[in-house]
Image: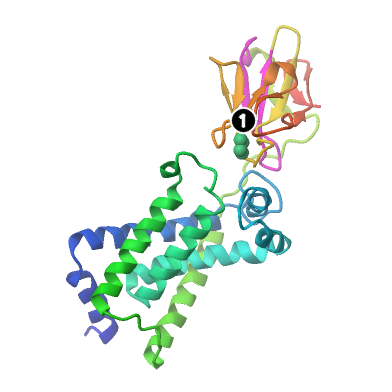
Amino acid sequence: MVNKHTQALLASWRSQHISVRVIRLWLGVTWIYGGWYKAVDPGFLAKTGPTSFARELVGFQTSSPLGLIFKYMLERSTFFGIGVILIEFALGFATLFWIAPTLSAFAGFSMSIGLWLTATWHVKPYFLGSDTVYAVMWLSYLLVLIGNRRKIDVSLDRRGALRVASLGAMAVVATLLARVFQKRTTGSALTPGGAIIKVADLPMGKNHEFALGTGEPVILFRTKNSVFAYSQICTHQGCTVQYLATDKALICPCHGATFDPFNGAKVLAGPATSPLASVKVAVSGDWVVLA
Ligand code: FES
């Protein structure tokens, strides 16, 4: 016997046009995946590291028109990081399971606008930043819901309050579950003296990428006379730079900063203003090791 909410849930899917169902499914699944992706990442709630939420906030502070808010958030980055995970799960479940749908669509729209003003504010052209696309998708979905209801009803009766509470429970359970499946940092952390690669496996003129114990990505070069390495964390806002052999340069995919690895990783083109951090390496016997 199907209860009233299950009937309403099934009816909500049946009554929507296929185009709306596609948008709803995509938004719901993607928001749940977004929460899961962050929750299983052991680096997301860390204070440093390439995928750290705190590090993202540092970048937002300087680049976003909402910079001041992020100073406050940075001091409470763990709290806000967990909040982001829970909200993403909650909005995904709410969208799929038809719980406070209009309110959820409005929250999804607001969140996407917030991300656009922060994470993808400097992405040019604008359509390469996914948050603008999500903002438009949430807005379209929200307008469909408003159009169907003729009014936005955000009042909650007892049953509605229970559904919202169950949504919170679903988000918490999903977060805890994701933490169980959290990616393990495999292998021993690379410490000074730790072997990186055999010299024989790194021919002259080639490079090799590895990660420090903190998860920080590093790129190692071998030239005729030496081995040297740099952090791949861009000194502008922390994206990961990549080596482009044709340009003989390390290039940041986010805003195009370019660094010269054969000259102390000095800046060849902005917006970064300082060189990449150098990582000390040395040759010890047959191995290149962390110095
Ligand atoms: S993060 Fe902006 S250029 Fe690298």
Q: Does mark 1 have its CB less than 8 Å from ligand 1?
A: yes
The answer, for residue 181, to whether it is visible in the render is: no
- The residue at the far bottom in this view is 158
Q: Secondary structure at mark 1?
A: loop
- The residue at the far front in this view is 65
**Residue 218 belongs to the span the image colors magenta:** yes
Ligand 1 falls in which quarter? top right
Residue 250, position as x, y percentages in the image: 61, 24
Is 41 drawn above or below residue 78 in the view shown?
Answer: above
Residue toward you, 166 or 151? 151
Residue 173, position as x, y percentages in the image: 50, 70
- In the rendered view, does 19 fall on the left or right side of 191? left
Residue toward you, 169 or 247? 247
Residue 25, position as x, y percentages in the image: 30, 60
- In the rendered view, does 175 fall on the left or right side of 74? left
**Residue 49 belongs to the span the image colors magenta:** no
Quadrant of the drawing holding the C terminus? top right
Residue holding disc 1: 257
- Give the residue type that dot 1 points to: Ala
Give, as a single range, the part of the protein colored magenta: 201-222
Question: Tag count in the figure?
Answer: 1
Label 1 Cα neighbours within 10 Å, binned few <14 / some 14-19 / many ≥20: many
